[in-house]
Amino acid sequence: MTRLFICVGALLLFSCQTVSNSSAVSDKANELQLLCNNEDLGACVDLGILYLGGEEPKPDGKKALTSFSKACNGGQGFGCYNIGLMYSQGLGVRKYPAKAFIYFKEACSLEVPFSCYAAAATYPKNDDFSPNHLKVVEYIKKEQELRRKPVEYYEQKCADGVRWSCFHLANKYKQGIGVKKDELKSVEIFEILCREGELLGCYKLGLSYAEGRGVEHDYTKAFSLYQRACDGGLAAGCNNLGWMYAQGLTVPVDEDKAYVLYQKSCRGDFSLACEKVKEIKKRKKQKVF
């Protein structure tokens, strides 16, 4: 039987994998709590992510669920999606696939594209279940439909403050999907997101400078942006910062610093960094002998 697979649990939106930076993260948690209390539902989502990841504040599934629930009840699709992730993976709560489906379904109805596929993948099984079941196909079709939305749709959503739409919009311009390829436009969007405190925006902007796509190749700017993302708790930023230390890009080669950064990234479940940690450990062990 053909199976449906979905990658869930490794990524919580919007902050991606998070790592601990005690002072910065604690301040961020207090700021997000105030915003959430004042009905900023996006802040409630980010607060929930902080409670699930890293070491500071102390992981607390109950508080994460409370934050995500407030967002979800207010119609913020990512709040519903992240509750689905919690129940599908047993993150801070007891694993409960049936509940995961309910929240993925709700997020799908709120037009979070990948949640539609998550709903299809977690659709309750019964005796006559098959991947071609009408409801499963319906969710997959909706996911595809949302992804095919014209660029104007994402522009309007982004203008309305729906952050995931801004990232989709930037990626569409960067890859030329449904619109004329314009890497400079994607960079402009990432710059705005980074200025507004979206760590993933800083990371994506750093990638653009490192790759020289849409901007002049500039490792110094890439380093600074990766540093900002890492300091804010983004595991991917720490991984790329570690890579720059390992390669000696804009800084002297420093494998010890690279190792520390890879460790931080690995603690945030960034699998590539975990592989780098193993490689460096192996090399150090060989040097001893």
Image (spheres, helix red, strand yellow):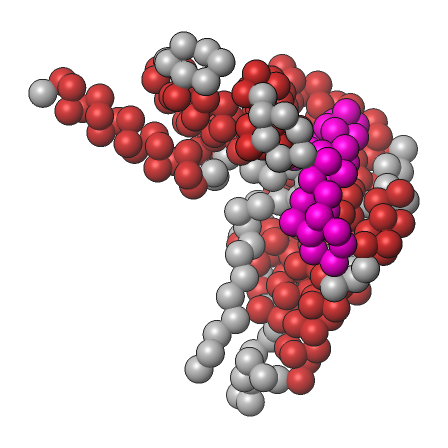
Q: Is residue 15 above or below residue 230?
A: below
Residue 195 magenta-drawn? yes
**Residue at 30% across, 33% down:** 278
Residue 181 magenta-drawn? yes
Q: Is residue 104 above or below residue 67?
A: below
**Residue at 61% across, 19% down:** 221
Residue 36 visible in rendering? yes
| Pick the front one: 168 or 115 | 168
> Considering the image in quadrants, where does the C terminus appear?
top left
What is the span of residues highlighted in magenta in the rendered image? 172-201
> Considering the image in quadrants, where does the N terminus appear?
bottom left
Magenta stretch: dominant secondary structure: helix
Q: Give residue 65's position: percent from left, percent from top.
A: 69, 46
**Residue at 37% across, 14% down:** 253
Q: Is residue 250 above or below residue 37?
A: above
Q: Is residue 194 above or below residue 257?
A: below
Q: Is residue 38 left or right of residue 23?
A: right
Q: Give residue 279's position: percent from left, percent from top.
A: 28, 32
* Residue 107: quarter of image: bottom right
Q: Give residue 87's position: percent from left, percent from top.
A: 60, 56
Q: How many numbered badges does the structure rendering display? A: 0
| Pick the front one: 237 or 92 | 237
Q: Give residue 155's position: percent from left, percent from top.
A: 85, 48
| Pick the front one: 270 or 218 | 218
Q: Residue furthest top?
A: 252
Residue 168 visible in rendering? no
